Image (cartoon, rainbow, N blue to C red):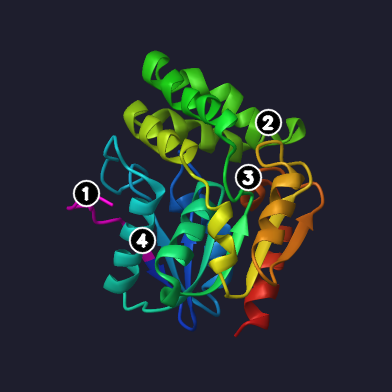
Amino acid sequence: MKQLAGITLYCELQGAGPNLVVLHPAGLHQGFMKSLVHAAAASYRVLAVDLCGHGRSPDAPGDMTLAHQALWVSEAMKRHGMEEATVLGLSLGGMVAQTLALDFPKMVKNLILCGCTGGFDSALQPILLERGLTAQRGGMQAIVAPTLQRWFTPAFMPHAEVLAVEQCLLKNHPLNWLATWRAISNFNALSRLNEIKVPTLVVAGDQDTATPLAATETLTRSISGAKRAVLAGAPHMMQIESHALFNQTVLSFLNEKK
């Protein structure tokens, strides 16, 4: 893997206790995980990361892969004195978390994978890549409506949190969005997931149209001993729309593993 040197991710660190790393969805940044981060920081040392091409981290190289993202997260962990941590990722963050656990197994103590799959069938690759190409052709405005529809339930659309997500998406550079979706389209860890030996929780929303329940079931079966929690009424952006239930589920798992 080409190193793509010179990438230092922006992170925010708060709290004290066992280490927890939090990784966000595509097009957003660590601020959109704030409800969980604040709740967890009462008992944990939480490192909230802006992935490459997001938030205050550097722009994404066009040939970036999720293995690169995992490498840069590992370097951020080391910079903050985290030789080992529980790693939580949602959507894109969950795919990066899986890759981190596979490529840097000694650094991952527990794994919490939220609203994500373990990989995509080759037939889906052009569809996923098209999400990035759409923004390249028409700007970020072209992807906002379909993205929000995948991420939230119709009843939640009028809420201020959805407007904040929309504004964040519009601030993204289309080339960062494209690089991210190109990396996502090439992600498939399913054949390697049996290498993961740490306690793992898969968190799914029963209203998640972006990551169907069948995909999270396959992910759970692919990791030895993994458990799945299905959140009633939760969509893809479960950490926002269903934050109380999401936080409760995550903290319950964390407290069991202390």
Q: Nearer the viewer, mark 1 or mark 2?
A: 1
Residue 251: in magenta span: no
Q: Which residue is mark 2?
A: 158
For the record, the magenta segment spans 1-12
Under circle 1, the secondary element is: loop
Crowding at mark 1 (Cα within 10 Å: few <14, some 14-19, many 20+): few
Looking at the rendered structure, the kind of residue marked 3 is: Met
* Relative side of 6 to 243, left or right: left
From the viewer's perspective, is residue 91 above or below residue 210? below
Give coordinates of residue 218: x percent, y percent: 71, 52
Marks 1 and 2, how far apart at CA: 41 Å
Tag 4 near tag 1, CB within 8 Å: no
For the residues bearing labels 1 and 3, Cβ distance under 8 angstroms: no
Element class at badge 2: loop
Q: Say which label, 1 or 2, has the lower sequence index.
A: 1
**Image marks 4 and 2: residues in contact by CB distance under 8 Å:** no
Please report whichever mark, 1 or 3, sits nearer to the chain's N-terminal start.
Answer: 1
Per the image, label 3 sits on a secondary structure element best described as loop
Residue 247, located in which quarter of the rendered image? bottom right
- Residue drawn at x 57%, y 46% as measured from the top left: 119
Which residue does the numbered mark 3 point to in the structure image? 237
The amino acid type, in three-letter code, at marker 1 is Leu
Q: Residue 73: which disc?
A: 4
Residue 4: give its label.
1
- Residue 19 placement (x, y as % from top left): 46, 77
- Neighbor class of circle 4 (other Cα within 10 Å; few <14, some 14-19, many 20+) is many
Rounded to the nearest whole Å, what is the CA distance between mark 4 and mark 1?
13 Å
